[in-house]
Amino acid sequence: MDTKGIMAAVTVNSLISTYTHTSTLSSFNRSPTRLFTPTPTVSSFHPKFHLRLRASSSFSISSTALIDANTTDSIEVEKEAIESSSNLLACPVCYDSLTWTSDPGFSVDAIPGSSLQCSTCRKTYAGNQTHLDLTTTGGAKTYGEPMPASTEIFRLPLVSFLYERGWRQSFSVWGGFPGPEKEFELMKDFLKPVLGGNIIDASCGSGLFSRLFSKSGLFSLVVALDYSENMLQQCYEFIQQEESFPKENFVLVRADISRLPFLSNSVDAVHAGAALHCWPSPLAAVAEVSRVLQPGGVFVATTYIVDGPFTFVPFLSTLRQNISQVSGSYVFLSERELEDLCRACGLVGFKCIRNGLFVMISATKPI
């Protein structure tokens, strides 16, 4: 090590020693003194991600010295961050980790030609021009399973085209939905504990909120997930039309909400906008959300709510749910049922905001 390297190491060690001594004294005085303060970047929100530190007004550290002393460590930290993101995806068949057989594709432009393989069953999954197909039937040549009508309708090209061209706007007219921007502001309060982490926009449709999440800069990775190929295609087209859209750390994934292709305890937040009532089995879906959320992870969803005698009379409530599921129509739940659903799937701290038929709910995976 040359003279500059030695001096840099001595300087850093001295600062660490001073910081340790200061912290020890502070713990006795119960008034901690912060030597370093995280910069106001996205990465400083969440402990899982690399924190970039700046010196406080009391100290001045040569950036050259830090680079000389810690270049190798910085490279290792960045490498670990990439590997951590790569390990997020799991095989929807056996839930074991997926390994990239091409360059990691957590970017809109990197999806075409990308491929992954399960480390257990050896099944491979590939990306097309717009998205990764991580459904259980992905790669099947002739076999496929139709979903209920409430799901299949969103796979139609016309519905995908109209979704942000009048369909979603109608929710505000007769459903009480406050509109995407206001909904985004409301959900940010629920998501504060996990800002800086990754977020799955489940049943994202044409990516209305996925794009808001990405452009906000509040999350390290945004996964726009839907079962409809045409919805993902529409999302991709909207992204291409925006010149300054942040395509890095944004990926479109086709997946079944009842078999999410993510490792257990790997996701910081899951959002489902105006989607829960469309899921064939809300219980199976929320159970999957609970599985993939890490302890302390947050689930936020908006849906229509049902009130009246059907919510209070046990027989009528059960009849309503059975008819909805058998017919493949929408499953509308009451506030009590939504809370009970979250509790049954191991989520706690249920909260909700209501406005007419609109309700936004939030629940957390216990730490």
Image: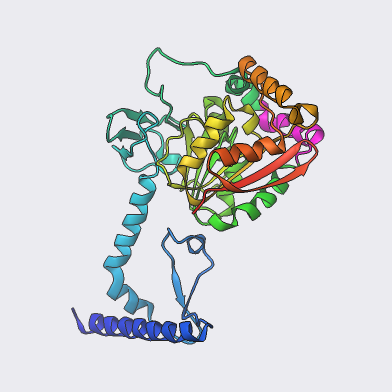
Q: Which residue is painted at 40% across and 83% down in the image?
A: 19
Which residue reaches farthest top? Answer: 142
Q: Which residue is painted at 58% across and 18% down in the image?
A: 148
Q: Position of residue 226 (x, y in %)?
A: 53, 31
Q: Nearer the viewer, residue 126 or 354?
A: 354
Residue 357 picture quarter = top right
Decide if residue 333 is in sight here: yes
Q: For this view, does 336 lie left or right of residue 63? A: right
Quadrant containing the N terminus is bottom left
Q: Which residue is painted at 69% across and 31% down in the image?
A: 333
Q: Nearer the viewer, residue 277 or 104?
A: 277
Residue 324 picture quarter = top right
Q: Position of residue 125 (x, y in %)?
A: 36, 30
Q: Nearer the viewer, residue 277 or 247?
A: 277
Q: For this view, does 96 lie left or right of residue 189? A: left
> Which colour assignment does the render follow?
rainbow
Q: Which residue is painted at 28% across and 75% down in the image?
A: 69
Query: Considering only vertical position in the picture, is 158 above or below 254?
Result: above
Which residue reaches farthest front? Answer: 314
Query: Considering only vertical position in the picture, is 249 above or below 76?
Result: above
Q: Which residues are magenta?
A: 162-177
Q: Position of residue 345 (x, y in %)?
A: 54, 39
Residue 166 part of the magenta segment: yes
Q: For this view, does 44 lie left or right of residue 140? A: right
Q: Position of residue 4 (x, y in %)?
A: 25, 83
Residue 67 picture quarter = bottom left
Principal secondary structure, stretch drawn in magenta: helix
